[in-house]
């Protein structure tokens, strides 16, 4: 395991931003603000670099925004912790994503990219969660981003729709037949502000009645229904299982319980048309 061997003031022209950095977009955002802070109080935490590589330059593992702020200030050097050895790309990405989450929220696209990369390396969402400390639901949604058609990826990247709504819209329309990108985007935008129960209602409606126009299904899902709260007592194992089901469905425990109750009643022949919110 690589460790910090020493600290030095390294000339900026001897540094390069490593490919392991997870923040690849909006890298210059708020740099002036950071530069002002460094000008007033100095650099509070050194950057982290690997030893010089084939190019003869140190590779920045952590601290590219601090490096860019020093460039903006025209400072000749920056304090850096120098690792004893080069780190593997996967280890560097884990370090980078963890530090960036502490310092400043990652750009949505950058977070999706690094979670997808780590998932491909580890082949397990749980492993990514353990290594980075990210919430399970966030990693799960980021990983599923790869399944989306390009048009839905675009609206997720801009923040108009979250991954969960985009996937549910795409899966719902795939049941109907050939996927029409503009219709998929429209449905995703309609579903985005809805509760999980409403989104599930649209999926179920399209699955059971593929000939019904999508607009009609959306309007029915939006219609207000009376909601009655039911308090249920569960054993420990049942509660754990419910939580696991909720994570798998990318929803809340309450909505997961509502979904299971409705599915169970429908399976026994009872009318659940009113649904729940």
Image (tube, rainbow, N blue to C red):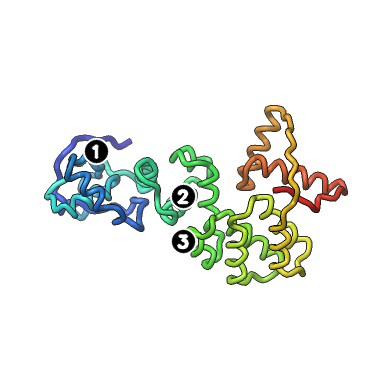
- Does dot 2 land on a helix, a strand or a loop? helix
Dot 3: within a 10 Å radius of its alpha carbon, few (fewer than 14), some, or many (20 or more) residues?
few
Where is residue 56 shown, x and y percent of the image?
18, 52
Residue for badge 2: 115
Separation of disc 2 and disc 1 at Cα? 26 Å
On residue 45, the disc is: 1
For the residues labelled 1 and 3, the Cα–Cα distance comes to 32 Å
What residue is rendered at 35% in x and 56% in y? 24
Tell me, for residue 244, which label it has, or none.
none
Label 3 near label 2: C-beta < 8 Å?
A: no
Assess disc 2: are there few (<14), some (14-19) or many (≥20) residues with their C-alpha within 10 Å of its C-alpha. Answer: many
Query: What residue would you read off at disc 3?
Result: 158
Q: Earlier in the sequence, mark 2 or mark 3?
A: 2
Residue at 78% in and 61% down? 208
* 158 to 137, vertically: above or below: below
Residue 165 falls in which quadrant of the image? Answer: bottom right
Spatial distance from mark 2 to mark 3, Cα to Cα? 18 Å
Earlier-in-chain disc, 1 versus 3: 1
- The relative height of residue 218 versus residue 273 in the rendered view (above or below) is below
If you read the primary sequence from the N terminus, does the residue marked by circle 2 or circle 1 appear first? 1
Label 1: element kind: loop
The quarter of the rendered structure image containing the N terminus is top left
Question: Which of pointers 2 and 3 indicates the residue nearer the eye?
Answer: 3
């Amino acid at each position: 395991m690589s460790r910090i061997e020493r600290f030095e003031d390294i000339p900026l022209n001897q540094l390069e931003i490593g490919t392991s950095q997870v923040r690849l977009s909006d890298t210059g955002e708020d740099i002036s603000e950071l530069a002002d802070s460094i000008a007033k109080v100095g650099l509070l935490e050194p950057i982290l670099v690997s030893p010089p590589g084939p190019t003869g330059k140190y590779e920045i593992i952590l601290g590219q925004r601090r490096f860019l702020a020093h460039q903006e200030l025209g400072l000749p050097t920056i304090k850096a912790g120098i690792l004893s050895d080069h780190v593997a790309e996967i280890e560097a990405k884990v370090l980078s994503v963890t530090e960036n989450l502490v310092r400043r929220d990652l750009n949505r696209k950058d977070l999706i990219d690094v979670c997808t990369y780590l998932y491909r390396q580890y082949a397990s969402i749980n492993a990514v969660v353990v290594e980075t400390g990210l919430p399970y639901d966030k990693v799960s949604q980021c990983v599923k981003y790869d399944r989306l058609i390009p048009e839905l990826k675009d609206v997720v990247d801009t923040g108009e729709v979250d991954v969960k709504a985009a996937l549910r819209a795409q899966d719902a329309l795939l049941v109907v037949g050939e996927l029409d990108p503009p219709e998929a985007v429209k449905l995703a935008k309609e579903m985005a502000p809805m509760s999980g129960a409403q989104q599930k209602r649209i999926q179920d409606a399209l699955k059971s009645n593929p000939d019904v126009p999508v607009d009609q299904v959306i309007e029915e899902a939006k219609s207000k229904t009376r909601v009655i709260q039911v308090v249920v007592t569960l054993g420990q194992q049942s509660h754990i299982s419910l939580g696991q089901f909720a994570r798998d469905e990318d929803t809340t425990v309450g909505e997961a319980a509502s979904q299971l109750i409705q599915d169970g009643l429908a399976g026994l022949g009872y009318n659940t048309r009113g649904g729940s919110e």
